Amino acid sequence: MSILNILMEILIAVLILIGAGFTFLGSVGLVRLRDFYERLHTPTKATTLGVGSLLIASAVFFSWQEPGWSFHEVLVAVFLFITAPVSAHLMAKAALHLREHGETSLPTETTLAKHDGEAAISLGAEQARQNGLSARAQGEGAIPEARR
Amino acid sequence: MKQLLPHPILTLMLLGLWLLLVNSVSPGQILLGAVLAWSIPLYTARFWTAQIKVRRPFLLLRLAGTILYDILVANVAVAILIVGPRERIRPAFIRMPLRLQGNVGVSLLANIITLTPGTLSASLSPDRSELIIHALQGDDPDAIIDDIRKRYEQPLLDALEQLELKRGVLGADAEPPHGAESAEPSKPQ
Amino acid sequence: MADTASTGIILNSALAIAFLLVSIALLLSLWRLIRGPEKPDRMLALDTLYVNSVALLVLLGILLASNLYFEAALLIALFGFVGTVALAKFLTRGDIIE
């Protein structure tokens, strides 16, 4: 086995490990973080980067192993990078909607205080704009208070 | 020309998509792809209501580079945040007044904000003047807003010029919060 | 991993670790899916589950040195997105097709 082969193998192995690591971290965040909006951050990003890295590894691997180039992995990567923020946005919107209309089931232990705080922001924001208040200042104040 | 080839960029993208899908660049596939890429925009022309004009394509390329770099660097930061103590995460909702107008610009900006770790675009205000952002570390909302403005919004403002050919399918007057999303299905998929 | 076209030991051990990590990631997402506690959480867990399975399929493609898994990965990614959009729409509007 030539030096080139070993180098290629190391490159692919590193890409695979980075990809799997980020995919793993994304799911760890999904379990570990406290409320829905925090959880929303990790899978949409870490997972996208993780799968992206795995796909690059796959493209390099097939270009190396088989005759000709292999670029179609780019397709899945581009697709994921376009769709991940869209679905994250839709999920955030759905969650905000459910919260504003009080359709979510009772929040659990860790999230109870914060949920009330957030509801106050999203509802308070509309009133704040009408009152000409700075909605952002209100939003800043609401969460730390709810946290305590 | 306008009638025969209504969306040249879309046509090019479709051709590229086809070649990637079949994973080959043989002449036959290029021909087949070209026919598809030419006919699909022609028959779906009525669906594409807004058209953007790219004034400075190189600025967009540079923006893409910035975004890729930010994704890489900031992902590591968020990864450390996930593994580290939970107390270091201080989430906050931030309202960011938008300077961008138009479907394509706003949805691009929202997507960029979500893709770059640490921030997430959660909602668009009904009058489309504000973007509601959720930040993992929202201690300093002004700094976050400044950062987004400088890095992403300004290049988009400089590079894009939106020509609203027709009012969107869901126009600004009909259910405004969802009107913004009417631009999103028009992404190439 | 006996009968694989992929050669050396470096790649094979990397693949083994990666399979382990992605499988645990799948289980963690599954836990969030079962646990909830709310509808949006389940939706997010399902979306993550889809993306994780795409990762698993890509790894399987490399392990078996087969191009066939690419199409499966693409389709899963597609279905995942459509499913998430439909779910989000359903939760927002109580209806999918208006």
Image (cartoon, coloured by chain):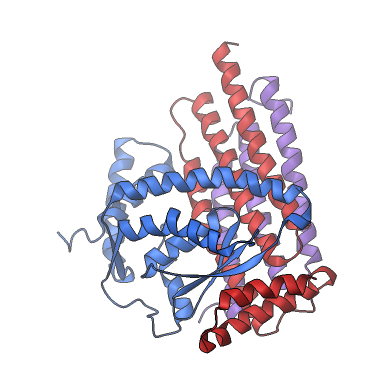
Chain colours: A red, B blue, C purple
Residue A42 screen position, x and y as percent: 66, 54
Choose between C32 and B38: the one closer to the eye.
Answer: C32
Residue A53 screen position, x and y as percent: 58, 39
Residue A126, picture quadrant: bottom right
Q: Is residue A63 above or below residue B82?
A: above
Q: Is residue B94 left or right of residue B21?
A: right
Could you tell me which residue is drawn at 68 percent across and 70 percent down? C40
Could you tell me which residue is drawn at 66 percent across and 44 percent down? A22
Could you tell me which residue is drawn at 31 percent across and 71 percent down? B49
Q: Is residue A101 above or below residue C46?
A: below
Q: Is residue A23 left or right of residue C35?
A: left
Could you tell me which residue is drawn at 67 percent across and 74 percent down? A141
- Seen as rendered, the residue at the extreme right is A109
Whether residue C82 is visible, yes or no, is no
Choose between A68 and A141: the one closer to the eye.
Answer: A141
Q: Is residue A141 left or right of residue B9?
A: right
Whether residue A91 is visible, yes or no, is yes
Residue C91, picture quadrant: bottom right
